[in-house]
Image: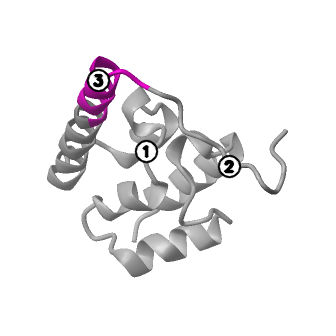
Amino acid sequence: MVTAGQQLQTPVRSHDQRLEALKRANEVRVARARLKQGLRAGDARVADVLLDPPVYVLTAKVFDMLLAVPKLGRVKASRALYQCRISQSKTVGGLSERQRAELVTLLERPR
């Protein structure tokens, strides 16, 4: 247990471990960027991403994924999350089954 006078220290990592972590983080960023491009181009569906998310999307914010959808800007994305009682800071992996289903249903309705 940490008391008031103590600070938590980050674990000591070797140079190779830091490089490996940077490499993995970069791979995740590239994969997410490709997915967002696919969403913008219509090659991917946000419903598929929300219902069966790839591993690299689990830590991404739902709001960021929604912003990549055509005709769904900040206001509409915020409104959709509000209607489904989902925080804008919620990650895709942190969504409950109810939240996933409700958001997909809302997004698939004709606008």
At which x and y percent is residue 109? Answer: 47, 61
Mark 2 is on which residue type? Gln
Choose mark 1 or mark 2, whichever is in front: 2
Q: Secondary structure at mark 3?
A: helix
Q: Which residue is mark 3?
A: 15
Q: Residues within 10 Å of mark 2 (few under 14, many from 20)?
A: few
Q: Secondary structure at mark 2?
A: loop
> Which numbered disc flags the more N-terminal residue, 1 or 2?
2
> Which numbered disc flags the more N-terminal residue, 2 or 3?
2
x 27%, y 33%: residue: 22
Query: Marks 2 and 3: CB-CB under 8 Å?
Result: no
> Left or right: where does residue 12 sit relative to residue 73?
right
Mark 1 is on which residue type? Ala
Distance of mark 1 from mark 3, alpha carbons?
Answer: 40 Å
Q: Which residue is mark 2?
A: 7
Residue 102 lies in the magenta stretch = no
Q: Which mark is residue 23?
A: none
Distance of mark 1 from mark 2, alpha carbons?
Answer: 43 Å
Q: Which residue is mark 1?
A: 47
x 42%, y 25%: residue: 13
Asked whether 90 or 85 is in front, the reply is 90
Q: Secondary structure at mark 1?
A: helix
Tell me the magenta residue range.
13-25
> Left or right: where does residue 103 sit relative to residue 64?
right
Residue 54 seen in the figure: no
Mark 3 is on which residue type? His
At which x and y percent is residue 37? Answer: 17, 49
Above or below, 1 relative to 82: above
Asked whether 59 or 111 is in front, the reply is 59
| Total labels drawn | 3
x 28%, y 59%: residue: 68
Distance of mark 2 from mark 3, alpha carbons?
Answer: 24 Å
